[in-house]
Image: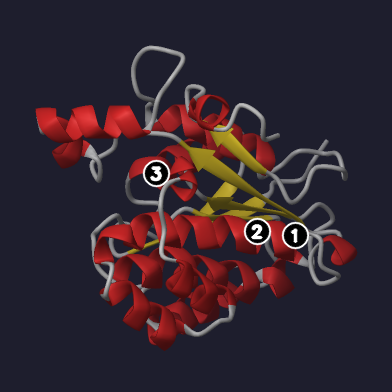
Amino acid sequence: MDTQRTVLVTGAASGIGEATRRRLEQQGCRVIGVDLRDAEIIADLSSASGRQAMLEAAAVLAADGLDGVVAAAGVAAPEPLTLAVNYFGAVATLEGLRPLLARSARPRAVAICSTAALLPHDPTAQDACLAGDEPGALAAIGRRADLAYMTSKRALCLWVRRSAVAARWAGAGILLNGVGPGVVETAMTAPLLADPLMREAIAASNPMAVTGFAGPEEIAELVGFLAGFEGHYLLGQIIFSDGGSDALLRPDAF
């Protein structure tokens, strides 16, 4: 039987992060939460200093290493902050905690992506993200802030796909995957979904084969699996939990 696994979850105070925390704790994990409030580590992942503070605190709280990392912190505002948190904060979390994961016998990492990655995005900002140019990416998305969320999630999907198969990840036995939720009813999305016109627009851009949007606990079920599965063959995947949106939008892509 496994010894207790230690998993760090960013965005653990609300939404998918909070639901993931509950799920992991139900599975017997010790969870180290990271958020702006109500967490073991209080840190602002939109800034380099906040990310560094998080890494330093994690090294103390998980001195023996981490078995899992879930990068769930995210925002959806039409501004550069969204790229800073959703992409650069997530990548800094995953890369920065990789040495702690390497100490585990079964290390797993999960990035919370989104079906928004399939929607229009800003290629210049995306390329700057993937090049690690945060000032350039924020400047570029500042000119098309309406595309900030989609661009941040598309860039994160691409980073997961490219990084997961690299020597520093798969070569070290650390399995990295992403989860791409469709529309999820959380405190962050509540104001949008409460507006009938916005709800209609969201439904139109996220066609579904089932009725009703997801609750965060549905996404947490999949994240909980990816944070602890026993096999060694599942990596580099963006698994969409979206009511069928991906299959409807891209029926010939698999």
| C-alpha distance separating marks 2 and 3 | 22 Å
Q: How is the image coloured?
A: secondary structure
Q: Quadrant of residue 228?
A: top right
What residue did someone put label 1 on? 164
Mark 1 is on which residue type? Ala
Residue 160, numbered circle: 2
- Image location of residue 202, percent across then percent down: 28, 34
205 on left or right of 72? left
What residue did someone put label 3 on? 18
Q: Residues within 10 Å of mark 1 (few under 14, many from 20)?
A: many
Mark 3 is on which residue type? Glu
At x 86% / y 39%, what residue is drawn? 231
- Image location of residue 19, percent across then percent down: 42, 37
In terms of sequence position, does the residue under pointer 2 or pointer 3 come before the other? 3
Residue 13 visible to the viewer: yes
Foreground: disc 1 or disc 3: 1
